[in-house]
Image: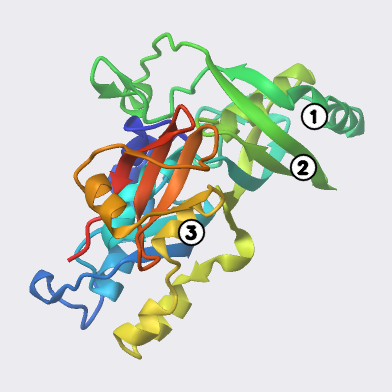
Amino acid sequence: MIEPAMEQLMSLPMDDKKEATSTAAPIPGSPSARMRRPVHGILLLDKPAGFSSNAALQRVKRLFAAQKAGHTGSLDPIATGMLPVCLGYATRLSQFLLDAPKGYEMTFRVGVATDTGDTEGSIVSHGPHGPDILSRIEDILPRFIGEITQIPPMYSALRHQGVRLYDLARKGIVVERKERAITIHALQLLAVEGADMTIAVQCSKGTYVRTLIEDIARTAGTCAHVVALRRTAVGPYRADAMITMPRIEEAAAGGSQALDVLLLPADSAVGNWPAVGLSKEMAFYVGQGQPIWMPRLPAEGMVRLYDERNMFIGVGEVLDGTRVAPRHLLRRK
C-alpha cells in the first residue's frame, strides 16, 4: 500500500499493514548504542523482499552506527525498491519525502481477488481473465490518469477509533471508510504474460496501489490482486541511485568512510526547490526563527536556505514575495 502523513511515518498506505510484526536479525559485530555516531545524509535503500521497512531501517542504522535514523514511507515485506533512509539531521526533511510523488512497477493477476489485495491474503473471488478482459483493462488505463478517488482498504494502517484497520480486518470487522482524492500522474502497460499484467505507475502521496488495481479490474468487469510490487521513485530520486543491502554490508566492512560515501546530502531531498543564499546576519535571524526581508525572491513557495559559507541550513517559505520565513532548520553539532 502507500499511506498519508503523521499517520504516514508509521502508516503509509503502501505496504505497512504488517510492519509491526517483523524485526531485524542481529548483525554480528555491530556497534552498541554507546558507540553510535552523528552521521547525516540520505541513503536510497533498495529494500529487499522479506524485510519490513522497520527491519530494513534498523539494519541500516546499525551498519552505519547512526545515532538517529528514520524512513520515509513504508513498504510491505513482499515489496522491494526505494526506501529513503534519513540519517541524523536529514530526518528533519523526512516529511517532504513522505509528501512527494511516488513511482511503482507492479504486476497483478487478473481473475483472482484476495482479501488483502496481494499475495499474502486469502482468495475471496474469481473473475474472467481471457484476452478480451486483458485488452479491456489496457483500454481503460487512461481513464484512471488524473485526479480520482479511492476508498482506503481495510488492510491498511489507517486508524478507526484508535485501532488500525488491518487489526480490525484480521478479526473480520469491516468499518466505513471515507473516499480520498488522489492523483495518478501516469499509467503505462509494460508487459502481459498469461493472466498477469505489469504496469508502471506515477502517483501522488496517499495512493493505495492495491486499491488502484482492484478498481481498474472492477471497471473492466473482473477482479485482480497484486503479485509483485517495486517502488522505483520517491520525489526527486530515481531507481538508478538505489543502494542494495549487500553493497551496504560490503561497505561496512571497510569502515565508516566507506559507508558515508553511499549517502546523498540532506538537501537532495528538496533539490528541485529554488535556492536562497543568506548573509551571516540573515542566517542568524533565520536561526532565531524570524522571517527576513530579501530582494529578488521567488513569488511564493518553499525554498532551500544556505548560509554565508554555502552550507545548507534548512528550508523556508516565501511570504508575499518579499520575505523568507524559516520552516524546518537542521541542527548540527
**Residue type at tag 3:** Ser
CA separation, marks 2 and 3?
34 Å
Question: Looking at the picture, does residue 152 appear above or below residue 189?
Answer: above
Which of the two discs, 1 and 3, sits closer to the camera?
A: 3
On the rendered image, what quadrant is the C terminus found in? bottom left
Q: Which residue is mark 2?
A: 197
Which of the two discs, 1 and 2, sits closer to the camera?
A: 1
Question: Looking at the picture, does residue 244 appear above or below residue 283?
Answer: below
Which mark, by number, is residue 268? Answer: 3
Q: Is residue 99 visible?
A: yes
Q: Give the x, y percent position of residue 269.
A: 47, 54
Which of marks 3 and 2 precedes in the sequence? 2
Q: Is residue 75 visible?
A: no
Which mark, by number, is residue 141? Answer: 1
Residue for point 57% across, 50% down:
272
CA separation, marks 1 and 3?
33 Å
225 with respect to 139 (left or right): left
**Quadrant of the image occupied by residue 149:** top right
Q: Give the x, y percent position of residue 258.
A: 38, 86
Q: Secondary structure at mark 2?
A: strand
**Residue type at tag 1:** Leu
Q: Give the x, y percent position of residue 47.
A: 47, 60
Q: Are marks 1 and 2 in contact (CB under 8 Å)?
A: no
Decide: few, some or many residues near mark 3? Use Cα within 10 Å; few <14, some 14-19, many ≥20.
some
Decide: few, some or many residues near mark 1? Use Cα within 10 Å; few <14, some 14-19, many ≥20.
some
CA separation, marks 1 and 2?
12 Å
Which of marks 3 and 1 precedes in the sequence? 1
Q: Nearer the viewer, residue 137 or 60?
A: 60
Q: Secondary structure at mark 3?
A: helix
**Residue type at tag 2:** Met
Residue for point 34% across, 83% down:
252
